[in-house]
Image (cartoon, helix red, strand yellow):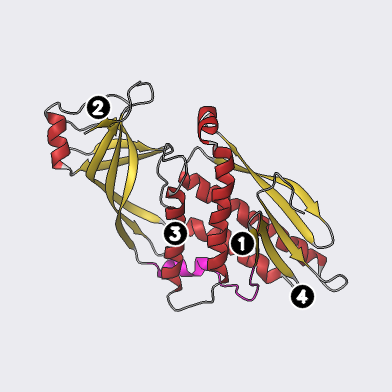
């Protein structure tokens, strides 16, 4: 029975007297390790200040069920009170797991590499639906090599199951039995991904060093990461130079960013380029009493 405070559970049903106990427990450890790493990856991408902590709530016998709760550290207490972020973090992480489990249970196809990219894009879209109305930074892009590591662990857990064993993911919304017959290794398909990735995304950036003369890139902060970019929005730059819009230390901008990432054959990021193609508004620094400053 699910404890009231648990976010999700992992159950392994096994046949008494026939299942190898070592393999059963190893499968549970690998599965929990994979789900823990998924939480760290997707929540860290949603905001670098989110640090999930896995806490064991209960263990049930008969079959083996591990009930787990996600706690969060290193978040501003005011944000927690204002947006009830603790509760939302658990719900978001569970939704991300269902997307991943669905992908892992799908039969291998010729376009497996493209389907892995689709999973990464779907996780990004899910993270942008955060109910805090983007008071947090917009999520960063998840590297495919990082994404496949916890997925491989879950697939390894499936391989350890015996013929009569079953692994089931549970949360308050229902259950999902993992298809142990599908054990594809996601990391095998990273090398098939095209080396260049190009697109646009909405971002909220904090200005660190503006270029008021138009001769070099602006420097920004996105969460804890640094980002350099040219501003290609000539209309906004003109209003800035005319003094019709002002920026001060710590100001932010809501903007559309065109990006180009280049990866090596293992999926490691080897180069990146950003251009701000549209500035939507300037955001006052936290110390300011005024609300967003329109442009």
Give the structural element (helix, strand or loop) at label 3.
helix
Image-based side of 232 in relation to 102, left or right:
left
Outermost residue, bottom side: 110
Which residue is identified by label 3?
A: 122
**Residue located 32% across and 50% down the image:** 201
Outermost residue, right side: 17
Outermost residue, front side: 173
Which residue is identified by label 1?
A: 153
Marks 3 and 4, the one that precedes in the sequence: 3
Marks 4 and 1, the one that precedes in the sequence: 1
Q: Nearer the viewer, mark 1 or mark 3?
A: 3
Residue 175 picture location, percent across and down? 66, 62
Disc 1: CA contacts within 10 A as few (<14), some (14-19) or many (>=20) = many
Label ID, residue 164: 4
Q: CA distance from mark 3 to mark 2?
A: 34 Å
Marks 1 and 3, the one that precedes in the sequence: 3
**Residue located 38% across and 21% down the image:** 287
**Residue located 13% across and 40% down the image:** 235
> Where does the magenta region start and end?
178-193
Marks 4 and 1 in Cβ contact (< 8 Å):
no
Q: Is residue 192 magenta?
A: yes
Residue 68 picture location, percent across and down? 69, 49
On screen, 240 above or below 44?
Answer: above
Which residue is identified by label 2?
A: 247
């Amino acid at each position: 029975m699910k404890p009231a405070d648990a976010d999700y559970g992992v159950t392994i049903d096994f046949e008494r007297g026939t299942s190898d106990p070592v393999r059963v427990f190893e499968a549970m450890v690998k599965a929990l390790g994979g789900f823990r790493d998924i939480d760290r990856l997707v929540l860290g991408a949603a905001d670098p200040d989110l640090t999930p902590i896995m806490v064991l709530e209960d263990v049930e016998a008969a079959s083996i069920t591990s009930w787990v709760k996600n706690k969060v550290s290193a978040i501003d207490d005011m944000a927690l009170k204002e947006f009830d972020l603790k509760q939302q973090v658990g719900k978001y992480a569970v939704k991300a797991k269902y997307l991943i489990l669905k992908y892992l249970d799908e039969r291998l196809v010729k376009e497996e590499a493209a389907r892995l990219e689709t999973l990464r894009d779907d996780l990004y879209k899910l993270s942008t639906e955060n109910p805090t109305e983007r008071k947090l930074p917009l999520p960063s892009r998840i590297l495919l090599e990082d994404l496949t590591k916890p997925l491989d662990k879950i697939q390894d857990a499936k391989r350890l199951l015996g013929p009569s064993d079953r692994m089931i993911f549970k949360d308050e919304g229902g259950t999902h039995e993992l298809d142990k017959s599908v054990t594809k290794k996601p990391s095998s398909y990273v090398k098939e991904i095209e080396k260049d990735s190009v697109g646009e995304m909405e971002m909220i950036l904090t200005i660190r060093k503006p270029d008021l003369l138009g001769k070099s890139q602006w420097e920004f902060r996105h969460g804890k990461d640094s980002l350099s970019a040219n501003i290609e929005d000539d209309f906004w730059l003109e209003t800035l130079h005319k003094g019709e819009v002002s920026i001060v230390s710590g100001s932010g901008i809501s903007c559309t960013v065109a990006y180009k990432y280049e990866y090596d054959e293992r999926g490691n990021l080897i180069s990146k380029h950003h251009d701000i193609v549209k500035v939507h508004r300037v955001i006052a620094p936290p110390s300011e009493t005024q609300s967003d400053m329109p442009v």
